[in-house]
Amino acid sequence: MTKDGEELARDGDAGVPGSLARVLGDVAAERAAQDSKWGMQAVPDGTGAEGAVAEADRARRETDEAGRRGELTWRHILREEVLEAFAESDPELLRTELIQVAAVAVKWAQALDRRPSAAGEPAPEADGQPRADRSRAAAVRSGPGEAAAKAAGGSRPDRFRAIVDVHVMLVRDGTVLLGKRANTGYGDGQWHLPSGHLEPGESVVGAAVREAREEVGVGIRPDDLEFAHVMHRAPDRVGLFFVARTWEGEPYNAEPHKCAELAWRPLGELPDDTIGYPAAAIARVLAEEPFALYGWPTGIA
C-alpha cells in the first residue's frame, strides 16, 4: 500500500473527510431512538452455544474461499465477525468481538455512502460535503425510519418491516427431504425443511441456494429452483418456498449441531411431528396454490 493509501486507511474517512463522523452520528441517533423505545435492556448474552465455534470456523473458511475466488462481499466479512461473537462466552472476549462487529458495520455503511445513489446522483465530493443534505434526502426518498423520524422530531409511525425466510423442498421420487431440528430453541424434535432467514444484500434465490448448501450439503443452480408458494405467517413473517428436483451431490446432515437426522418422507404423508407451517405449505404446493395465510385470526383476508 502506498503512503497515501496508508494514511487513508488510518484516518477512518477513506478519503472523504467527515465520513466516519457522519456514520457514527447516525449510529448514535439510532441508539437514542432504541433507548427511547425500549430503555436500557438487560438480557442474557445467549452466546457460546454448542456448535457456535464450528459455525464461526465455517464462516471464516467461506470468507477466505470467497476472497481467493475474487467474490468477497461485505456480507461474508460481517457474517464472519457476527458468528465469531456468537461463539464467545467470556464477557471480555465477547466485548472485543462486538466492537469488531460494530467497526465492520460502520465501514460497510461508509462504503455505501461512497457509492452513487440509486437515483444516479454522484458520490459525495472529496471535500466531504454531503449532497445537499444526505440524511434529509434519504428520508424524503424512503420515508423516515425510526432513527430518522426521532432525529427530525417527527411523529410518523415506524414503517412495518417483515422478516423474510426461504425454504427449499428437495423432491425425489415423490418424497421430500426433511430434517429433525435440535438445539435451536425453535421446533426442536420436529421435522422441517432446509430453511433460513434472508441476509442483508442477498436475493431470495441466493438465500435458497445458500441454505441448501449449508444445511444439507448440496449445490443447486438458481435456474433449478422453482418458486412454488409464498406464506404470510402472523404477525411479521413471509416465507418463500422453492422446489428443486435437480442438484449436485448427495444430501447429508451438514449441521449436526442443529439437526438430529435427515429423512426422505412421502410428500402426501408427512410425519405427524412436522412443524405446522411447513406442513401446511407443502400441502398448498401439492394443491398448486401459490399463496396462503398462516396463524391469522379467522376472517382476516
Image (cartoon, rainbow, N blue to C red):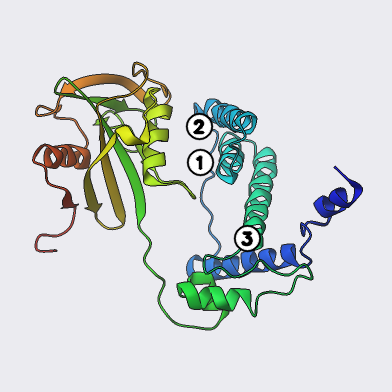
At label 2, counting other C-alpha atoms closer than 10 Å, the crowd grade (few under 14, some 14-19, many 20 or more) is some
286 displayed left or right of 13: left
Q: Nearer the viewer, residue 227 or 199?
A: 227
Check disc 3 and report its element: helix, strand or loop.
Answer: loop
Decide: marks 2, 1 in contact (CB < 8 A)?
A: yes
Q: Quadrant of the N terminus?
A: top right
199 displayed left or right of 15: left
| Mark 2 lies on residue | 49
**Residue 46: mark:** 1
Q: Is residue 298 above or below residue 283?
A: below
Decide: marks 2, 3 in contact (CB < 8 A)?
A: no
Check disc 2 and report its element: helix, strand or loop.
Answer: loop
* Residue for point 10% across, 27% down: 269
Q: Amino acid at mark 1?
A: Gly
Q: Which comes sooner in the sequence, label 3 or label 1? A: 1
Q: Amino acid at mark 2?
A: Ala
Quarter assignment of residue 76: top right
Residue 183, horizontal then vertical, whole percent: 39, 30
Q: Nearer the viewer, residue 137 or 184?
A: 137
Residue 288, horizontal then vertical, whole percent: 11, 42
**Residue 115: mark:** 3
Q: Amino acid at mark 3?
A: Arg
Is residue 258 among the parts visible in the rendering?
A: no
* Residue for point 73% across, 74% down: 129
